[in-house]
Image (cartoon, rainbow, N blue to C red):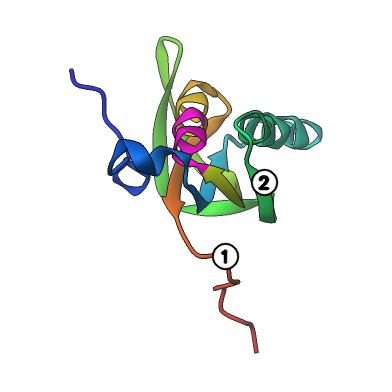
Amino acid sequence: MAEEMSPAIATDTADDAAVTRIYEIGYHITPTTKEEDLEKVVGSIRSVIEQAGGSFIAEGAPAQTRLAYPMMVKEGEKKVEYDRAYFGWLKFESTIEGAHALEEALKQNASLLRFIVFTTVREDTRAKMK
């Protein structure tokens, strides 16, 4: 099977490799993770970004939320269904290699149900509550 690469962080040319871009990651942490261990999981994500030379712009701390639909996850030899998860996000600036390193590290993190890494803009684009 061919290795998949996220189209949001794919490289265009070799010269683009040194250019920094703004990325955002959205992630779901398994609900079986204890609340006191959430910071450890987020810290592991932050450390990968820092090791790649990235800098942080904004962050949304993980909070438990109900999922739109149940997710089946294989844990060992059995499948487990989750209807809740802790959702959080990070916005950071990094090189393309840093984003690829982060994506590979996230694939190995057993505490994450799902994640997405994509390019974005530096400005705050969230809708304001009235």
Name the amino acid type tagged 2.
Answer: Ser
Q: Please state which of residues 77 and 28 is positioned toward the viewer in this rendering.
A: 28
Q: Please state which of residues 30 and 97 is positioned toward the viewer in this rendering.
A: 97
Q: Position of residue 23 (x, y in %)?
A: 51, 51
The quadrant the N terminus occupies is top left
Q: CA distance from mark 2 to mark 1?
A: 12 Å
Q: Quadrant of residue 91?
A: bottom right
Name the amino acid type tagged 1.
Answer: Arg
Q: Quadrant of residue 129?
A: bottom right
- Decide: is 78 above or below 55: above
- Decide: is 101 above or below 60: above
Q: Would you say 97 lies left or right of 28 here?
A: left
Residue drawn 39% across the image and 33% down it: 72
Q: Quadrant of residue 57?
A: bottom right
Label 2 secondary element:
strand
* Residue 112 appears in the rendering: yes
Looking at the rendering, the stretch of residues picked out in magenta corresponds to: 95-101
Q: Residues within 10 Å of mark 1 (few under 14, many from 20)?
A: some
